[in-house]
Amino acid sequence: MATATAAAKSVKDFVFEWEGKDRNGKIVKGELRAGGEAMVSATLRRQGILVNKVKKRRASGGSSIKQKDIAIFTRQLATMMRAGVPLLQSFDIVARGATNPRLTRLLNDIRQDVETGTSLSSAFRKHPMYFDALYCNLVEAGEAGGILEALLDRLAVYQEKTVAIKNKIKSALTYPIAVMVVAFIVVAVIMIFVVPAFKDVFQSFGADLPAPTLMVIWLSEFFVKWWWAIFGAIGGGGYFFIQSWKRSESMQKRMDRLLLKIPVFGDLMYKSAVARWTRTLATMFAAGVPLVEALDSVGGASGNAVFQEATEQIQRDVSTGSALTTSMQTTGIFPTMVLQMASIGEESGSLDHMLAKAAEFYEDEVDEAVKGLSALMEPFIIVILGVLIGGIVVSMYLPIFKLGQVV
């Protein structure tokens, strides 16, 4: 028996596209993961489907599945279940409408698990890369309480808000980073190709060059000689920095603390972390998840190691009988407004509602901060580029201004 099981597990599954007729004679189509066409035909026959065509789907990678894709899927699934569409049929509809082949395969895999008797939350737990503990816990709570549609709707709202905040942060950071990269490339081109041409002209003048021009020429010679080392150091250093940030827990903590202290950007990061923290806890608590268990998912969802450490401390305090507001205040990282809203919510028994209001407030604050940051960065970047590139140009033209004295 053990040998047979091992052999069955060793069979490689493929995805097959099939077409046939159901018991009513209606043409139906779909996809099925199996070890071969014979297994597909046998499975469909057991379901009462007369198979007309079975074809192995070509391996197509497709783009990676993003959080936005999961948010859209959650919203579609919640909408269809609220409309009374059965769960399996809902998965079929969403999978067929998905434009990303990877997402289609993921949804078909989950559907097959559910069809064989696995609970929806357990099927989601098999794919932790796309469905985190918070997602699975809320789905499990919805299945247990018979309110899956309502909790899927809450999940959809939560994910849409989270994706919106992340996109705003990215938009705020993308512009200055892109301008800095372009500025570096322009300066490198000037130093490597333009300045050496001016240098040959200046050597024919036979006069002493101004100090700014000599400095630019020296930098140009350094670029020409060591350009490979400069680009290698910047590219390699950036790569290793990002990798260490992703993989090293101590590095993540140091960088997250530093990010919160950076002028202008730090305030944006802080408001974003507060918004996600309050939104996550409000969603979990509204779903009926006990507070101590809900705090398991809240820290990681904030996206900042400082808030994650504070959440772990709050969880320890709350598990020993402390009030949530008192524990939050002890950490010293939450704004007064959030503390007051949490306190009112605890006293009135509407903690989820008050935290949701706080989340909405800070989500609006993030939106305003991004708009203000964009307006502030444009003139700031223009000044920096003007000084940098303008300084190089002026340095190159200073000897030409002295040309009359040489002649």
Image: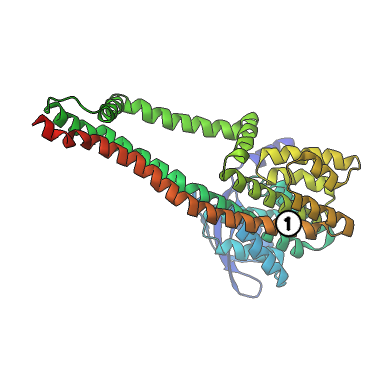
Left or right, 372 with respect to 313, comes to: left
In the picture, the quarter occupied by the N terminus is top right
Spot occupied by residue 364 in the image (x, y as percentages of width and height): 63, 59
Please tell me which residue lies in front, 407 or 46: 407
Please tell me which residue lies in front, 6 or 130: 130
Q: Is residue 352 visible?
A: yes
The residue sitting at 80% across, 63% down in the picture is 147
In the picture, the quarter occupied by the C terminus is top left
- Tag 1 secondary structure: helix
The residue sitting at 65% across, 56% down in the picture is 363
Q: Is residue 137 above or below residue 153?
A: above
Mark 1 residue crowding within 10 angstroms, few (<14) / some (14–19) / many (20+): many
Which quadrant holds residue 37? bottom right
Left or right, 93 with respect to 358, comes to: left
Q: Is residue 259 above or below residue 121?
A: above
Q: Is residue 401 above or below residue 112?
A: above
Spot occupied by residue 131 in the image (x, y as percentages of width and height): 67, 49
Spot occupied by residue 297 in the image (x, y as percentages of width and height): 74, 46
Name, please, the residue furthest toward the left. Answer: 407
Q: Is residue 300 above or below residue 207?
A: below
State the residue position of label 1.
358
Which quadrant holds residue 329? top right
Q: Is residue 122 visible?
A: no
Left or right, 352 with respect to 37, comes to: right
Q: How many marks?
A: 1
